[in-house]
Structure formats: C-alpha cells, structure tokens
Image (cartoon, grey):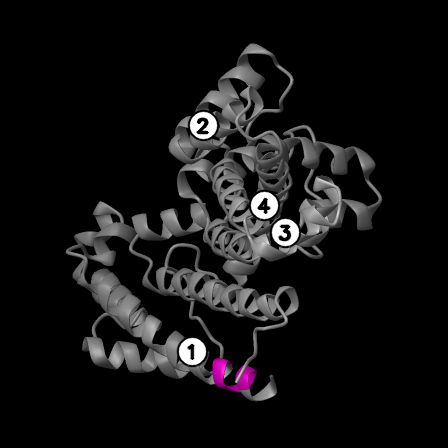
C-alpha cells in the first residue's frame, strides 16, 4: 500500500506540472490582451502606463520565460498574484473554495441519500407504478439542465411560495461569521450564533438540491442496474433457497457488492461539483470557485486561471485516489501493487 501511495504521489507531481503547462499555453493562446481587459480607456492611451502594466505582470517577456518563472514559483507553492484582485491567488482560492465545498457536500448528501433510497426501492418494487415514478424522477434529474432547474426552484419556492430565502450565502440583514474556516456552518457553530447557522442552512437547501439532482439520477439508475445484476448471481439464489428473507439478502448480501460502481459515480460527481458550477453559482449568487473562475476568465487573469485549473485538477486526482482506496475496503479481492 505504501509503495502504491508513493507512486501515485510522484505521478501527481508530474501531472500537476503538465497541467500547468497546458493551461498556461491555452490561456495565453486566447486572442485577447489582458492589458485591454484590465486597463481603462484613458490608461490605454498612455504608452508608459501600458508598458508599466506589461512589465509588472511579466507580459513583456517571451512566453517560455513567463512559464519558467511561473513554474519556479509554483515549486515553492506560490500561485502568483491575481491581476484582477491584486491579492495572492492562494488567498483568493482559500476565500472562495470553502463556499463551493460547503455547497458540494450538501448536494452530495442529497444525491447519495435519495439516489440510494430510490434505487433500492425501485428494485424492491420492480415492475410496479412506484418503480415507474422513480424511473421518471431519475430521468428528469439527469436530463434537465442545472441552470434551468435553478431558475425553476427559485421561481417556485422563492417567488411563488415565499418559503425559500433570496439568493446568496446568508440574508442581507445578517453579517458573515468571523472567518475561521471559511465554512459558514462551522464558523457559525464556533461563534455560537444559532440564528446565523439556521439562515446558512436555509440558503444551502435550494442550490444544494440543484447541484445534487443530476448525481441523484445517476446514482438511482446505477444502483438499480447493479443490484439487479447482483441479485441474479448464484449465491443470491442459494441464500433464497435457504429461506433468508429478500430484505436481508438485499441489504446484507447484495448491497455491498452493488456499491462498487456507485462509489465511482459518487467520486466523479463530487469532483465535478468541487470544480464549481458557474451557472448555478451565478443564479444563486453563490461566491464560490465557479464565480471566481468566471470573473478571472472575463479579465484574462492568467495567474488566477491557472491557479483554479490546478486546484480542480488536484481535486480530481485526490478523489480518484480516495475512490481507488475505497474499492479495497468494499471488495477484499482488490489488491494494490
């Protein structure tokens, strides 16, 4: 196991360097000029101001020198300074990423709970009206675009019924908790402000459902097909012949073996949610990594663009590793070399 982890870590280092090179080249290949995107019309007419801007951000250097400078800083875990915010990119990511993590966790809790529940029920109630309803819900979840779902949820629960709070992370009448972890739920608990905690939870519900709908549909369909395959195995028929109840067989014998493909779906979906869903975060005015990436792209903020890309890639690699290790816990036949 240790040898396997060391090998994966070394591959991770080379992978991150490769991703930084690709993203750096692609971001600089965009036919736009960050000078035009960041300076006012008045400053653009001043050659000295333009030259000073290019010199400050190294844009007057050849592209290979710019990348070598960036790579040298990256090896010291320095992601550079954002052109747009004038703050270190690492600090910006630390400020925006907790909001995305919090929303992604809520979305995954919703997706996993209802996905497993609906998948199991659809197997137990196979060929009934209940299964047809669940199948329709799962198809709806994977088919409806997330931005459309976000607008429908806001229209129904915020505008029509008035039971959901307005978009944002907290209500405007409340102040954000002291920044300790960046997670409003945890910071509210540390601060002992139950009113802020409840308000933060209420603001998480609609965007969390919107984030989790697609994954919920995938999990429902995956666990259903996997369970049906496992239930047709010989050892299941033997257990039925011994007189074990169908409920015990399903939960104690079949479910564990059917979870392997579901773990893959959960891992990949969670990784995608951590990358930030720009449209959902925009509609719900959620200050997450998706919003930050969109704003950085708009201003051609190269350090921020590369920093976000590296963060997303790192999430994918770490979650992939966690899924691989989880396979060994769920299936004793899996061995790591």
Residue at the extreme right:
192
Give the mark toward the camera: 2 or 3.
3
Q: Secondary structure at mark 1?
A: helix
Q: Quick one: label 3, few (<14), some, or many (20+) residues within 10 Å?
A: some
Sequence-first tag of 2 and 1: 1
Q: Where the N terminus falls, by quadrant?
A: bottom right
Residue 74 is marked as 1
Give the mark toward the camera: 4 or 1.
4
Residue 149 is marked as 2
Q: Is residue 116 magenta?
A: no
Can you give x and y, in whole percent of width and height, for residue 204 in the image?
Answer: 62, 36
Q: Secondary structure at mark 4?
A: helix
- Residue, disc 4: 108
Can you give x and y, in whole percent of width and height, for residue 99 in the image?
Answer: 58, 48
The answer to whether the residue labelled 4 contacts the one labelled 1, judged by CB atoms less than 8 Å apart, is no
- Residue, disc 3: 236
- Cα gap from disc 4 to disc 2, whole angstroms: 16 Å
């Amino acid at each position: 196991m240790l040898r396997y982890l060391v090998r994966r870590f070394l591959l991770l280092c080379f992978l991150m360097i490769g991703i930084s090179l690709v993203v750096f080249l692609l971001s600089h290949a965009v036919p736009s000029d960050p000078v035009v995107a960041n300076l006012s019309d008045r400053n653009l007419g001043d050659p000295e101001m333009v030259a000073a801007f290019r010199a400050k951000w190294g844009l007057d250097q050849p592209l290979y020198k710019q990348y070598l400078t960036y790579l040298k800083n990256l090896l010291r875990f320095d992601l550079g300074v954002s052109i747009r915010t004038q703050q270190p990119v690492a600090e910006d990511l630390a400020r925006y990423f907790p909001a995305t993590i919090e929303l992604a966790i809520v979305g995954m809790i919703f997706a996993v709970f209802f996905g497993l529940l609906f998948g199991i029920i659809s197997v137990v109630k196979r060929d009934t009206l209940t299964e047809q309803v669940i199948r329709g819900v799962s198809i709806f979840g994977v088919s409806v675009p997330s931005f459309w779902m976000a607008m429908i949820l806001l229209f129904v629960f915020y505008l029509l019924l008035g039971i959901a709070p307005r978009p944002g992370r907290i209500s405007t009448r409340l102040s954000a908790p002291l920044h300790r972890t960046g997670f409003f739920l945890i910071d509210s608990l540390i601060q002992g402000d139950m009113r802020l905690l409840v308000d933060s939870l209420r603001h998480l519900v609609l965007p969390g459902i919107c984030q989790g709908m697609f994954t919920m549909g995938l999990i429902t369909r995956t666990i259903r097909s996997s369970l049906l395959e496992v239930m047709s195995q010989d050892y299941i028929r033997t257990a039925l012949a011994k007189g074990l109840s169908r409920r015990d067989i399903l939960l104690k014998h079949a479910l564990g073996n059917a979870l392997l493909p579901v773990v893959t779906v959960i891992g990949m979906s969670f990784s995608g949610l951590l990358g930030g869903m720009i449209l959902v975060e925009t509609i719900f005015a959620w200050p997450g990594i998706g919003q930050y990436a969109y704003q950085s792209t708009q201003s051609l903020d190269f350090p921020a663009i590369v920093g976000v890309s590296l963060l997303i890639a790192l999430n994918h690699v770490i979650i992939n590793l966690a899924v691989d290790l989880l396979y060994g816990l769920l299936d004793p036949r899996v061995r790591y070399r």
